[in-house]
Image (cartoon, rainbow, N blue to C red):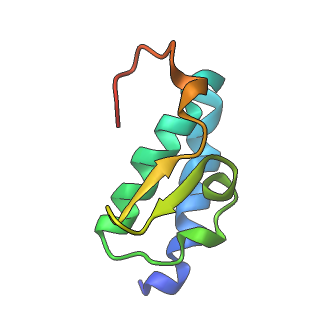
Amino acid sequence: MGWASGSRLADEVWAGMKEYIPVRHRSMAAQVLANAFSEADCDTLDDCEFVRKYLAYDEESGQWEVKHPEENKYSDCGSA
C-alpha cells in the first residue's frame, strides 16, 4: 500500500472506532491514531476529517497535538 491512501485508511479506522470512544476522549484518541500513522511515514493526514476537527501539527515536535487540550482536562485516559 502506498501512503497516498493512508489518509483514507486512517479515516476508515476512525469511522469504525469513534462510536466506542466517549466524546470527551475523542481528541486524545485522534492524537494517538494520527501520531501512529505519522510514525509509519503517512504524511497525508491533513486530509483526514478527524485530524482537521481535533488536531494541529506541531512542526517543532513533529507530532500531532490536540487543538483544545482544555476539553480533556477531566479526562481519565492519560496523556497521549
| Residue 23 found in image quarter | top right
Q: Give the vertical position of 25 relative to 75 (above or below).
A: below
Q: Give the vertical position of 24 relative to 1 (above or below).
A: above
In the image, what residue occupies the spot 35% across and 37% down? 80
- Inspect this view and state whether residue 47 appears: yes
The image position of residue 44, as x and y in percent, is 53, 77
The image position of residue 45, as x and y in percent, is 54, 69
The image position of residue 43, as x and y in percent, is 45, 78
The image position of residue 34, as x and y in percent, is 45, 56
| Residue 11 found in image quarter | bottom right
- Inspect this view and state whether residue 22 appears: no
Q: Give the vertical position of 75 relative to 14 (above or below).
A: above
Q: Give the vertical position of 45 relative to 71 (above or below).
A: below
Which quadrant, please, contains the N terminus?
bottom left
Q: Viewer-proximal residue, 34 or 19?
A: 34
In the image, what residue occupies the spot 60% across and 56% down? 51
Count of numbered circles on the image:
0
